[in-house]
Amino acid sequence: MALKFSVPGEIGGVSFLDSSRGTFRHLKVDFSFKRRERRTILSKRTCCSIQQNPPPAWPGRAVPEPGRKSWDGPKPLSIVGSTGSIGTQTLDIVAENPDKFQVVALAAGSNVTLLADQVKTFKPKLVAVRNESLVGELKEALADCEEKPEIIPGEQGVVEVARHPDAVTVVTGIVGCAGLKPTVAAIEAGKDIALANKETLIAGGPFVLPLAHKHKVKILPADSEHSAIFQCIQGLPENALRRIILTASGGAFRDWPVEKLKEVRVADALKHPNWNMGKKITVDSATLFNKGLEVIEAHYLFGAEYDNIEIVIHPQSIIHSMVETQDSSVLAQLGWPDMRLPILYTLSWPDRIYCSEVTWPRLDLCKLGSLTFKVPDNVKYPSMDLAYAAGRAGGTMTGVLSAANEKAVELFIDEKISYSDIFKFVELTCDAHRKDLVANPSLEEIIHYDLWARKYAASLQPSSGLSPVPA
């Protein structure tokens, strides 16, 4: 079988899936692979649709448990990834609502200057800097602080921030599998998770979800699409959810003909029509890999089967996602493209907090005029079929898909591979992983195959023989 990507002279002979049969949700993919359990290896032909799923975070409905505490004073928060986009927007919310939230711990990677400013403003008790070599610089920057926080360097420091005893909710904003260990630590410490790290569920779902259920921890989605779904299922009766509809802007190339994609340059892929985001997520929006990954995340969060999760192109990015109930009613969440709203809801749930229309402009549908939708093109966006195939395979395959895409996007941004190579590299990496797929992985296995996928993707030749070569 071959991936049909209509760029002359590109890709052939790839066997991970066949996307030539139209919309993937009507295709039941049957992979032949060896499934590896921890101590037993057996070879069998396995239909991906029978993959045993971990328990979802929210099985089609969201209802606060009786007696859930509404905070009278400021709710204590830990923020992992405080200097990134999610972290800084979370701190904007805290600054605007000091009577509702307080920061007890912050963790950052290497932006010591910004971290020091955050410490001076929010006065956390504990601070971690992942880059241990920068601890001295951070201490120097905080030398004039009257109340100095405890500083713990490295990965252990990030973990300690995540499980700080005073924190009630932990915001996980670190990108990649680096966010998995601190998230696990927070869950084991009984903290609710404001989830902005996709890898927590895309790679770690088979391990993380049972752990969250064991510790009675709530996983609250902080990205706009899954927050929209989460808001729409509030109070639904059992078994009411019929379908999830994820909206996508279509990214930089939604109006480009397929034939023109062979001319794509990095600067073209970074021109998002609606959102101002980092380079990686902007490229993911252009390829629609972001939406494919969100399909997997929606499956893990809400328990919907892959046949019941759909993607629709919505250029205005006003409807952030929809759900259909059993009686065919469709519920949607609308708002301006602003990440602060879904972040705020994860922090305040199940309550709603008043927001000033000065800093939070209210939606005006009359001013907006019209909302439009269209079916995504599987030929333009091969990422959709790859994501659905990986999701149906389950286990470690979804993490491999995510890691391979991250490496491929990095290579594309560095201008080492072409735009079409992104899809090629991801498919080849997933295809190579089939023989080693672990259905119910441990945390160590999840991290191992994340690293393996990055290394394997990096070893592939761009636009040539399609065979891995030594890196």
Image (cartoon, grey):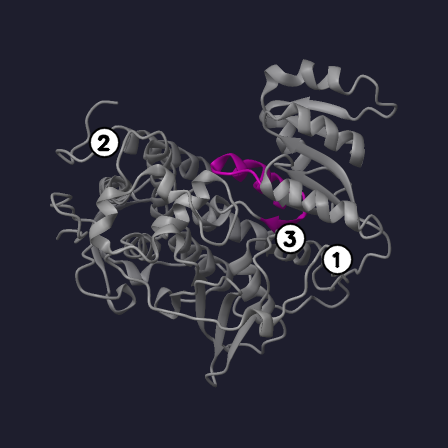
Instruction: Give the quarter of the figure containing the C terminus.
Output: top left
Examine the image and state in which quarter residue 279 appears: top left
Instruction: Please tell me whether residue 27 belongs to the stretch shown in magenta.
Output: no
Instruction: Please tell me whether residue 186 belongs to the stretch shown in magenta.
Output: yes
Task: Give the Cα distance between marks 2 and 1.
Answer: 51 Å
How crowded is the residue under tag 2: few (<14 C-alpha within 10 Å), some, or many (20+)?
many
Disc on the earlier residue, 2 or 1: 1
Residue 257 percent across, percent down from the top left: 25, 56
Q: Is residue 188 visible?
A: no
Q: Residue at x 50, y 40 (%)?
A: 278
Q: Amino acid at mark 1?
A: Val
Mark 2 vs 3: CB contact within 8 A: no
Residue 308 percent across, percent down from the top left: 38, 70
Task: Give the Cα distance between marks 2 and 3.
Answer: 39 Å
Q: Amino acid at mark 3?
A: Arg
Look at mark 2 in the image and give the residue it sits on: 460
Label for residue 138? none
Range of magenta residues: 173-195
SS class, disc 3: helix
Q: In the visual, does 3 lie left or right of 288? A: left
Examine the image and state in which quarter residue 351 appears: bottom right
Label for residue 358? 1
Between disc 2 and disc 3, the foreground one is: 3
Look at mark 3 in the image and give the residue it sits on: 340
Disc on the earlier residue, 2 or 3: 3
Q: In the visual, does 408 lie left or right of 122? A: left
Up-down relation of residue 371 to residue 379 (above or below): below
Between disc 2 and disc 1, the foreground one is: 1
